Image: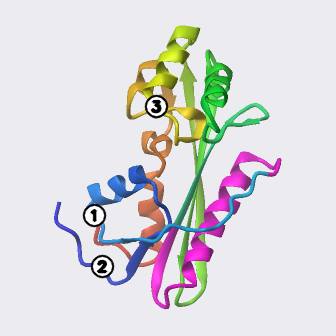
Amino acid sequence: MPKLALPRQIVLASRSPRRKELLEAIGLDFLIHPSQFQEKEEHITPEELALHNAMGKAQEVSRNYKDALIIGVDTVVAFNEHFLGKPKDREDHKRILRILSNTTHKVISAICIFDTKNKKNITATETTLIIIDRLEEDDIEAYVNSGEGDDKAGGYAIQGLGALFCKKIEGDYFNVVGLPMYRLGKLLKEFGIKKLL
């Protein structure tokens, strides 16, 4: 898809290949500048945690640009009191999948768009519910062996093999991939980026 000429420079404060692919798919012209922000892991609500991290990422990268819109995004996977981040190792990966087995969990993404010109920022969160099938130990072993979920919050990828044990999704699919596109489009329009549609 050809890139669209936009009135402002857009910068994605993330090294996520999934987020990059989603923005490329809509023809957005943007730069990638991964944030060095240290994500918070305190026991607050999933929405507060995702918002804190998304804002921190956008603001950390914003120091490098005088006139740009910085997109910071953070995705949190939560089940009851568990915050399920990226697996630390093989055993942690199995632990996460055992927690998710035969449950409904939440995927919460927060977006912060920071305008470096006037220091204005707009935020939003999106929540999607995922129902996971019962996972047998050999299912868990096989999925961990695939390596697909090693670098993903919640330890699985809904756009890959993980789709085979996601029984039902309620909400925005792209949110689970890592970037709620509908919500992003609405936020960009508030900054005058209206040529996408």
Specify whether residue 136 is in view: no
| Residue beneath disc 1 | 197
Residue 55 - label = none
Q: Which residues are magenta?
A: 42-71
Task: State how far apart marks 2 and 1 are (Cα).
Answer: 12 Å
The residue closer to the viewer here, 84 or 166, is 84
Instruction: Say which residue appears at 60% left-offset and 54% top-offset.
Output: 125
Q: Residues within 10 Å of mark 1 (few under 14, many from 20)?
A: few
Upstream in the sequence, badge 2 or badge 1? 2
Specify whether 51 is left or right of 74.
right
Q: Please, what secondary structure does the residue beneath circle 1 have?
A: loop
Identify the residue position indicated by label 3 in the image. 147
Question: What separation in Å lies between label 1 and label 3 (alpha carbons)?
Answer: 37 Å
Of the pair 101 and 95, the residue shown nearer to us? 95
Q: Earlier in the sequence, mark 2 or mark 3?
A: 2
Spot occupied by residue 11 in the image (x, y as percentages of width and height) = 43, 73
SS state under label 3: loop
* Image quadrant in which you'd find residue 12: bottom left
Question: Mark 2, residues whose alpha carbon is within 10 Å: few (<14), some, or many (≥20)?
Answer: some
Instruction: Name which residue type carries label 3.
Output: Gly
**According to the image, label 2 marks what residue?**
6
x and y percentages locating residue 104 in the rendered image: 63, 24
**Which residue occupies the foreground of this view, 148 or 126?**
148
Q: Residues within 10 Å of mark 3 (few under 14, many from 20)?
A: few
Q: Are marks 1 and 3 in contact (CB under 8 Å)?
A: no
Q: Amino acid at mark 2?
A: Leu
Query: Percent x, y for residue 139?
Result: 50, 13
Kindly report the distance in space between the C-alpha atoms of the residues bearing marks 2 and 3.
38 Å
